[in-house]
Amino acid sequence: MKKVQDAIYNWLTIKAVIDERPDDQAAVETEELFRSILTEELGLSEIKVKKENGYYNISYVNEGKQHNTRFSQELIEVMINQINDSPDRYQNYPE
């Protein structure tokens, strides 16, 4: 289960970047890679994300069973906050 948690964390962190910078091609490509790990390698489906009360709540199906997990908003948004704090270090190269 830890591998699933780690993969969801990685995917959700880059998804938060895309939500704020949808034209960031590098982030889009990275999100696609992480999503394929979730769906193709780990077999997750029906992945849903809901942000509320300072948390990202994630639901998904794995091996026919419904699962739920959550991560703090602060933890997930570390990368986008770093990008916003130092935009000169994280230039956006749209396609």
Image: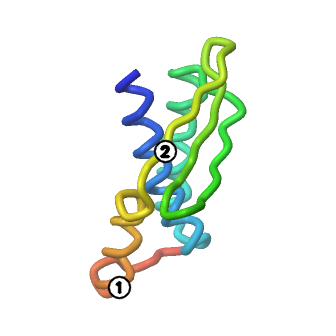
Whole-Å distance between the Cαs marked 1 and 2?
A: 28 Å
The residue at 55%/58% (across/down) is 28
Q: Is residue 24 above or below residue 42?
A: below
Q: Is residue 51 above or below residue 58?
A: below
> Of helix, strand and loop, which one carries label 1?
loop
Which residue is disc 2 drawn over? 70
Which residue is disc 1 drawn over? 87
Judged left or right of residue 8, residue 46 is right
Q: Pointer 1: residues within 10 angstroms few (<14), some, or many (20+)?
A: few
The image quadrant that residue 23 belongs to is: bottom right
Q: Nearer the viewer, residue 59 or 25?
A: 59
Q: Is residue 2 above or below residue 7?
A: above
Q: Earlier in the sequence, mark 1 or mark 2?
A: 2
The image quadrant that residue 74 belongs to is: bottom left
Judged left or right of residue 50, residue 4 is left
Judged left or right of residue 48, residue 19 is left
Q: Pointer 2: residues within 10 angstroms few (<14), some, or many (20+)?
A: some
Task: Pinpoint residue 76: horizontal percent, then vertical percent.
Answer: 41, 58
The residue at 43%/36% (across/down) is 7
> Of helix, strand and loop, which one carries label 2?
strand
Task: Pinpoint residue 33: horizontal percent, then vertical percent.
Answer: 51, 41
Q: Nearer the viewer, residue 76 or 83?
A: 76
Q: Nearer the viewer, residue 93 or 30?
A: 30
Q: Nearer the viewer, residue 55 or 94?
A: 55
Disc sitting over residue 35 in the figure: none
